[in-house]
Image (cartoon, grey):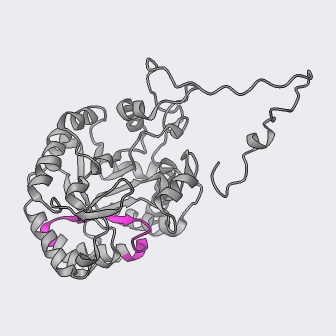
Amino acid sequence: MDAGRPPRPDDALAPSADQLSIFGEAPPPAQPRRAARASTPILAAPTPLVLPPSLERFRGRLGLGTSSWSFAGWQGLVYDDPGAPYPESRLSREGLPAYASHPLLSAVGIDRSFYAPIPLDEYARHAAQVPPGFRFLVKAPGRVTDALKRDDLGRGREPNPGFLDAQSAISAFVAPAVEGLGDRLGTLLFQFSPLPAAMLADVPAWIARLRAFLDALPRTLPDGAGYAVELRDASLLTPRLVDALRDAGVEYCVGLHDRMPPVERQLRALDRLHPAGEGPLLVRWTLHAGLGYEAAKHRYAPFRELVDPDPATRGPLAARAAATLLAGHAVTVIANNKAEGSAPLTLRALAREIAAHVDAAA
């Protein structure tokens, strides 16, 4: 049960083991639900997640998606409910076609590439499971974007010699993602883990090193694909950094995370990258303000409802997304379950609010 959530009605009415039935007998113990049989195809939920009508004209420029797709708690919301849960390992392999059949969901993030590189044939299998126009946002391996080697608990133990190694990034990440995903590739994302204090003490030196890394990356990418940088240190978000990204032709990903400033400040930084809003909007809405990752996971699982709606974030984000679309530029928003409780429902609420701004401007 979610922390801080009152019991569901079913919880309150469920009989205890010592309660008697109307026949004077103890009720039989609840039987665990068996996993859905592997022979049962994974289908989309019968009620599709739809795009508001006023946003239909922006198809091809509006990409809304979740951070991964293999959540068993989404049965009945994204996936059908055959009466037994699908194993998440099976959803990872076979669930993407059902996910991509929802009109609302035209993009998805691949996060696990951060923990270990993904081979080309796996990227190609993902690309073959989605329709034309669908786009993937893929995170670079942490061995390239984390300045420290970390233990199993995420604690930095020693310097990482592969940090900002362009050749490693190309061979383990850029090349297989480009070839495997082809025209389904949207964004190659370099999300930088929190930097050690020594690097934060000389931000201009780190930015110069980042710029050299970005300049070494291949510039031949599929149409509509590009590179982006996301931060986990608020002190790095400076005019010098934004200028370096602009000069390198790399996007800034607005990272809505407890370690980063609120959405309004990050959007102001984006104004320097694209004056007057003349450029795309890329957002990863990852974590609810004031919560750590594990706390949010415990509070929100199984990710079927908006436990903590965040209108203070959604409002400015929807307004900027609508203005960007109306100006003729692309918008991509990847939402995590840990943002409000359920990524698909976060995106549905966001799409409705973007549509309201579009309608108001008509």
Image quarter hosting the C terminus:
bottom left
For residue 115, side relative to residue 216 (left or right): right
**Quarter where residue 128 is shown:** top left
User: How many numbered callouts?
Assistant: 0
Task: Judge by depth and name the residue closer to the eye, 272 or 285.
Answer: 285
Is residue 354 rendered magenta in the image? no
- Vertical arrangement, residue 318 with respect to residue 103, above or below: below
- Vertical arrangement, residue 185 with respect to residue 125, above or below: below
Residue at the far top in the pictured view: 39
Q: Give me the residue at 39% from left, 67% from top.
A: 320
Q: Position of residue 50 (x, y in %)?
A: 47, 43
Q: Which residues are magenta?
A: 246-265
Q: Give me the residue at 46% from left, 57% from top.
A: 355
**Residue 127 in sight in this render:** yes
Q: Position of residue 216 (x, y in %)?
A: 7, 61
Q: Give me the residue at 42% from left, 65% from top.
A: 257
Q: Give me the residue at 60% from left, 55% from top.
A: 307
**Quarter where residue 233 is shown:** bottom left
Is residue 255 rendered magenta in the image? yes
Q: Position of residue 265 (x, y in %)?
A: 38, 77
**Quarter where residue 106 is shown:** top left
- Vertical arrangement, residue 101 with respect to residue 135, above or below: above
For residue 315, side relative to residue 146 (left or right): right
**Residue 222 in sight in this render:** no
